[in-house]
Image: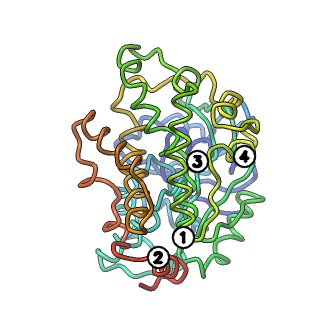
């Protein structure tokens, strides 16, 4: 039995808490005090009800709003919040870390690199590991104050560890928490394996008029991903795969991801694959352009991807175009607020230097 701390109280956090607790582990949920009301029923009854792909009433050890209490005695601290809040949680967590702590971002999207760089900026040096899940394992929604509905759960879970040389310190713990979890080469592979930035951003922009006109009655996966949109999504996804190749990685394309994760069927193109991904059918949204598919996946995902690609000499023109258009549509400057190479501490590194850094932790 492991002591698992989950930071966050949203869809993914509750789903992970339920699955892990149903396996017999002690789960502590931390939520920021300003969101205390959202988890009040779980705190009171110490139960999360899960329906759908994972069924059962999961007993939660405790819900706390004290970060010190949350991490004391924890085998692993899993941060499950929208990636735009990673930095806030990093700044909250860094001062209370002790040697031997293990931090996991689910998903990561290079969150580990930003975490380490922020700790260095604060002058904090601890013997820790920081890991990135390749993706959130669940297609899930909160349907009542203490209940989640899990539409689908990835068949294959994988994560990378920073520094990679310390992976055998954290992986035995994670194999208990998530039996069968696979170890990726490093956090670069994990970060670049998140499909959401190439799955969401371009498709949302190509459906911008429909989304704003629909007043909430829009289904991205069913009506937004038409054959033409899927063709464009394939091309931007190929840029992501090409970045991986420049780093010696063989990343899964969107076409291959769904059948391997047992989310959907095989197909010759992305249109054929996505039409068979049943867990995503019937999921409504987004209701407006100012939503996570752009406000999270562009500044945290595509921006970092494109900057790595450009630094390595990879053609990322489609990614850069999507970033510029998203900035214009939303009137934002993601280059100033997003997850850049500078905030990840990897600006100016070539492929060999990048790979060596994430392996050893030494620049």
Residue located 42% across and 77% down the image: 350
Callout 1–callout 2 Cβ contact below 8 Å? yes
Callout 4–callout 3 Cβ contact below 8 Å? no
For residue 200, above or below residue 119: above
Q: First in sequence: mark 3 or mark 1?
A: 3
- 83 sits to left or right of 19: left
The residue at which mark 4 appears reads as 261
In space, the residues marked 4 and 2 are separated at their CA atoms by 28 Å
In space, the residues marked 4 and 1 are separated at their CA atoms by 23 Å
The residue at which mark 1 appears reads as 247
Q: Give the mark toward the camera: 4 or 1.
A: 1
Q: Is residue 278 visible?
A: yes
In space, the residues marked 3 and 1 are separated at their CA atoms by 23 Å
The residue at which mark 3 appears reads as 136
In space, the residues marked 4 and 3 are separated at their CA atoms by 12 Å
Out of 245 and 153, give the one closest to the viewer. Answer: 245
- Percent across and percent down for residue 39 are 49, 38
């Amino acid at each position: 039995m492991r002591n698992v701390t989950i930071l966050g109280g949203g869809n993914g956090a509750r789903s992970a808490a339920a699955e892990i607790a149903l396996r017999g582990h002690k789960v502590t949920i931390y939520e920021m005090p300003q969101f205390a009301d959202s988890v009040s029923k779980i705190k009171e009854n110490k139960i999360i009800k899960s329906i759908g792909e994972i069924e059962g009433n999961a007993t939660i050890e405790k819900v706390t709003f004290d970060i010190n209490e949350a991490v004391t005695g924890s085998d692993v601290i899993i941060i499950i919040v929208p990636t735009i809040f990673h930095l806030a949680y990093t700044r909250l967590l860094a001062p209370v870390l002790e040697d031997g702590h293990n931090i996991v971002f689910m998903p990561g999207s290079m969150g580990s690199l930003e975490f380490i760089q922020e700790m260095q900026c604060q002058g904090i040096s601890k013997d820790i590991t920081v890991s990135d899940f390749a993706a959130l394992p669940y297609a899930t929604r909160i349907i009542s104050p203490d209940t989640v509905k899990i539409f689908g759960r990835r068949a294959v879970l994988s994560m990378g560890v920073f520094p990679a040389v310390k992976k055998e310190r954290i992986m035995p713990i994670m194999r208990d928490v998530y039996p069968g979890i696979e170890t990726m080469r490093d956090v670069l592979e994990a970060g670049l394996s998140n499909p959401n930035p190439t799955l969401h951003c371009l498709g949302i922009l190509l459906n911008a008029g429909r989304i704003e006109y629909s007043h909430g009655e829009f289904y991205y996966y069913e009506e937004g991903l038409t054959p033409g949109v899927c063709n464009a999504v394939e091309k931007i996804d190929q840029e992501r795969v090409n970045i991986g190749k420049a780093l010696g990685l063989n990343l899964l394309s969107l076409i291959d991801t769904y059948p391997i994760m047992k989310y959907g069927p095989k197909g010759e193109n992305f249109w054929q694959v996505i039409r068979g991904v049943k867990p995503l059918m019937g999921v409504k949204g987004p209701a407006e352009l100012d939503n996570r598919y752009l406000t999270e996946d562009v500044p945290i995902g595509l921006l970092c991807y494109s900057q790595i690609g450009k630094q390595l000499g990879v053609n990322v023109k489609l990614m850069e175009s999507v970033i510029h258009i998203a900035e214009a549509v939303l009137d934002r400057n993601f280059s100033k607020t997003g997850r850049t190479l500078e905030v990840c501490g990897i600006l100016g590194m070539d492929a060999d230097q990048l790979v060596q850094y994430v392996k050893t932790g030494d620049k």
